[in-house]
Image (cartoon, helix red, strand yellow):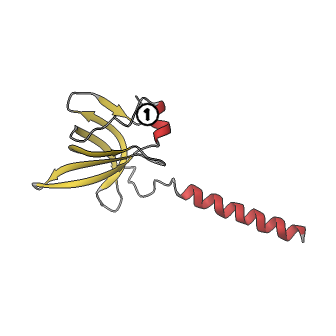
């Protein structure tokens, strides 16, 4: 009886750990490719568990919005970021790992602002 209870508990813990790790998967991004998005910041979402950058890029004469995922506010604040790191209207070039499925999104790598200022995920 103790063995069965222990086995059930162990399996439950193993399965719950797997689902929590799945949240942090970056399998949807193509880490073998880098793309530069040249556009204007629409919104910077300083939220947990990850921050998001909404950027509008001109493609074929039309405005196209991309959603770029970055690290958590906790990690980024330790690297010098703040909720004011990106502001609506900022002109910026974002380097990202694009989505594998070609949808309009990506994983943040670095930014270069029109004034020459640079910001990366690993540097402040």
Would residue 35 be visible to someone looking at this image? no
Place residue 103 in its image quadrant: bottom left
> 46 or 104: nearer the eye?
46
In the orientation shown, which residue stands out farthest toward the right? 1
- Residue at horizontal 43%, vertical 46%? 47
Numbered circles on residues, count? 1
- Out of 34 and 119, give the one closest to the viewer: 119
Q: List x then y, in percent, for residue 68.
A: 34, 49
Classify 70 as above or below 80: below
Residue 74 visible in the snapshot: yes
Q: Is residue 123 above or below residue 68?
A: above
Residue appearing at x 49%, y 49% in the figure: 49
Pick out the residue farthest to the left: 61
Which quadrant is the N terminus positioned in? bottom right
Q: Using a 10 Å C-alpha cutoff, classify the residue at mark 1 as few (fewer than 14 neighbours), some (14 to 19) or many (20 or more).
A: few
Q: In the rendered view, does 76 fall on the left or right side of 109?
A: right
- For mark 1, give the secondary structure: loop
Q: Quadrant of the C terminus?
A: top left
Q: Nearer the viewer, residue 25 or 124?
A: 124
Label 1 sits on residue: 122
Which residue is drawn at the image coordinates 28% and 41% (left, top)? 94
Q: Position of residue 61 (x, y in %)?
A: 9, 54
Compared to residue 83, the image places residue 16 above or below, namely below
| Residue 22 location (% of width, % of height) | 54, 58
12 relative position to 44: left or right:
right
Residue 59, given in percent of the width and then of the height, sits at: 15, 54
């Amino acid at each position: 009886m103790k063995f069965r209870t222990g086995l059930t508990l162990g399996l439950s813990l193993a399965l719950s750990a797997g689902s929590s790790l799945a949240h942090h998967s970056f399998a949807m991004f193509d880490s073998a490719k880098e793309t530069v998005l040249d556009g204007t910041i629409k919104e910077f979402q300083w939220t947990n568990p990850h921050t998001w950058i909404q950027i509008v890029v001109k493609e074929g004469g039309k405005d196209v919005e991309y959603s770029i995922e970055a690290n958590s506010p906790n990690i980024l604040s330790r690297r010098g970021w703040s909720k004011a790191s990106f502001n609506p209207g900022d002109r910026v070039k974002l380097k990202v790992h694009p989505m594998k499925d070609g949808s309009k999104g990506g994983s943040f790598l670095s930014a270069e602002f029109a004034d020459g200022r640079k910001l990366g995920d690993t540097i402040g």
